[in-house]
């Protein structure tokens, strides 16, 4: 990747970081995004970003959990290649992330505890949170399908 593209990758990563995305995960994601094949080895990521193997590993683990990066065998080598999903990283973010379901599953316990404690403020916030995550759990797969349909229509 050219120095100019790597510099731009860092600018994009900084925007993601400001929005709350972990810094190393942002840097790795944007470096993959702007690499020629959208795939790099851990050593290539380390070299391009000037970070440790542990930092690469942590970022990859985080991105895999979100479905934004996947591992595959590097042909002719024992190394793994880290790549963006075929339908691009942003479509992975529109699929139903597991944390929506996980958060929704824990909220009834909090709501019950707030009701038991007669804590009206926390109860109202937890109920609103439950409604939001239930809405997101239902709508995210629908948005993903809409995105795919719009991509098909553009071709």
Image (tube, rainbow, N blue to C red):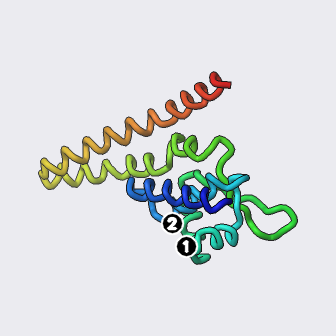
Q: Residue 63, position in %: x, y? A: 56, 58
Q: Position of residue 112 (x, y in %)?
A: 24, 50
Residue 30 on image: x %, y %: 57, 56
In depth, the one of 89 and 120 nearer the eye is 89
For image coordinates 53% across by 62% down, the residue present is 27
Image point (38%, 57%), residue name: 18
Badge 1 or badge 2: first in the primary sequence: 2
Residue 74 is situated, as x and y percent measured from the top left of the image, at 79, 62
Q: Residue furthest top?
A: 153
Q: In the rendered image, which residue does mark 2 sit on?
A: 24
Front position in the image: 129 or 48: 48
Furthest residue in direction front, as rendered: 4
Q: Is residue 149 left or right of residue 73?
A: left
Q: In this rendering, is residue 38 above or below 56?
A: above
Look at mark 1 in the image and give the residue it sits on: 55
Marks 1 & 2, CB-CB < 8 Å contact: yes
- In which quarter of the view is residue 56 placed? bottom right
Eyeballing the image, is 88 above or below 24?
above
Tell which residue pokes out farthest to the right in this image.
76
């Amino acid at each position: 990747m050219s120095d100019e593209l790597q510099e731009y990758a860092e600018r994009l990563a900084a925007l993601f970081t400001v929005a709350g995305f972990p810094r190393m995960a942002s840097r790795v994601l944007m470096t993959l995004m702007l690499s020629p094949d959208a795939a790099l080895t851990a050593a290539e990521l380390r070299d391009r970003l000037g970070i440790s193997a542990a930092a690469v590993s942590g970022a990859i683990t985080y991105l895999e959990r979100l479905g934004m990066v996947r591992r595959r065998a590097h042909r002719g080598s024992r190394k793994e290649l880290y790549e963006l999903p075929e339908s691009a990283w942003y479509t992975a973010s529109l699929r139903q992330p597991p944390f929506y379901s996980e958060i929704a599953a824990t909220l009834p316990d909090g709501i019950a505890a707030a009701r038991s404690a007669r804590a009206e403020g926390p109860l109202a916030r937890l109920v609103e949170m439950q409604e939001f995550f239930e809405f997101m759990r239902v709508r995210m797969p629908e948005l993903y399908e809409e995105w795919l349909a719009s991509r098909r229509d553009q071709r």
